[in-house]
Image (cartoon, rainbow, N blue to C red):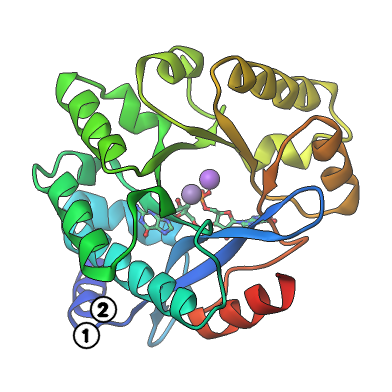
Amino acid sequence: VEFELDLRSAVAEQALEVHYQAVVAVADGTPRGVEALLRWIHPLHGPVSPVEFVPVLEETGLVVDVGRWVLDTALADLSAWRRDGVVGDDFVLSVNVSPRQLLDPYFAETVRERLQAHGVEGRSLLLEITESSLLEHDERTLRLLESLRSLGAGLAVDDFGTGYSSLSYLRSFPVTRVKVDRSFVAGVNHHVGDEAVVRAVVAVSEALALAVTAEGVETEDQRRTLQELSVAHGQGWLWHRAQPAGETAAYLRAGR
Ligand code: G
Ligand code: G
Ligand code: MN
Ligand code: NA
């Protein structure tokens, strides 16, 4: 309860921050985009992981307002980077969307309106949804995802492979990208099963014309294997840890 109160005041006092992790070409490390990641710097406890507080945002419904703020902040940063020549027109901003946000009847309208306000085309935005969002799939979710697609936005399934019935979701929902969960990337050179999963995800994605991003790439060995497996995009500490907008801009500039 105290945690929840702290979180409520953090939201009220704008103590949350949006940091960014680069998404790069696996082949040569060229930045292709960033993922916006929420951070909470607690006045006493220091940085608190979103793994701990995003569920609380979800339960309290705060995630709807916070999510809107993340989207707005990230689009403002993208727009500034474009203006300053830090990134080109084909650079893509990824924003995480929680299951609760997909139940917000104004979500698609918010996205449309925020894109317009910042002068960003839909195709420059990738919305990351979890498998569990699709688990609660119904006609309404499907229509929402279709309206997001009609804005031009991409849709990625986050943490892919950690849920279940994943393959049928890829066919039933209008997703454009799959993010291979970092647990598979971690073992890709040492566990035959992990390599097989990545290989299978790439094969299915090719068949369904979906793009693939590998998460949690930490070593050159992993990078090389992912390149051999034809994974085009990657994220991870090998290239870049999430940082505030200013530091991220410097990274992006240097990597062009
Ligand atoms: O950076 P990492 O520890 O930073 O993120 C942990 C988890 O928190 C990830 O699964 C990520 O999807 C989630 N997360 C980070 N930022 C956001 C956000 O803005 N909205 C939602 N819904 N989840 C987020
Ligand atoms: O949305 P999502 O679950 O994908 O958020 C990304 C999470 O993965 C964040 O918690 C982020 O800090 C974390 N992360 C990003 N790169 C790496 C990495 O190379 N290794 C590990 N262990 N975690 C990472
Ligand atoms: Mn994500
Ligand atoms: Na993920």
Cβ–Cβ below 8 Å for labels 2 and 1?
Answer: yes
- Give the x, y percent position of residue 224: 88, 43
Please state which of residues 12 and 74 is positioned toward the viewer in this rendering: 74
User: In this figure, which residue is indicated by the disc labeled 1?
Assistant: 13
Lateral position of residue 113 relative to residue 71, left or right: left
The residue positioned 17% from the left and 47% from the top of the image is 107
User: In this figure, which residue is indicated by the disc labeled 2?
Assistant: 10
Count residues near mark 1 (Cα–Cα under 10 Å), then give few for <14, some for 14-19, many for 20+. Answer: few
Ligand 2 is in which quadrant of the figure? bottom right
Count residues near mark 2 (Cα–Cα under 10 Å), then give few for <14, some for 14-19, many for 20+. Answer: some
The residue positioned 70% from the left and 34% from the top of the image is 184
The residue positioned 39% from the left and 51% from the top of the image is 96
For residue 21, which quarter of the picture? bottom right
- Give the x, y percent position of residue 64: 18, 55
Question: What amino acid is at disc 1?
Answer: Glu
Ligand 1 within 8 Å of the CB at mark 2: no
- Mark linked to residue 165: none
- Give the x, y percent position of residue 36: 45, 63
Lateral position of residue 213 relative to residue 166, left or right: right
- Residue 1 visible at all: no
- Give the x, y percent position of residue 78: 43, 70
Lateral position of residue 233 relative to residue 2, left or right: right
Please state which of residues 188 and 33 is positioned toward the viewer in this rendering: 33
Question: What amino acid is at disc 2?
Answer: Ala
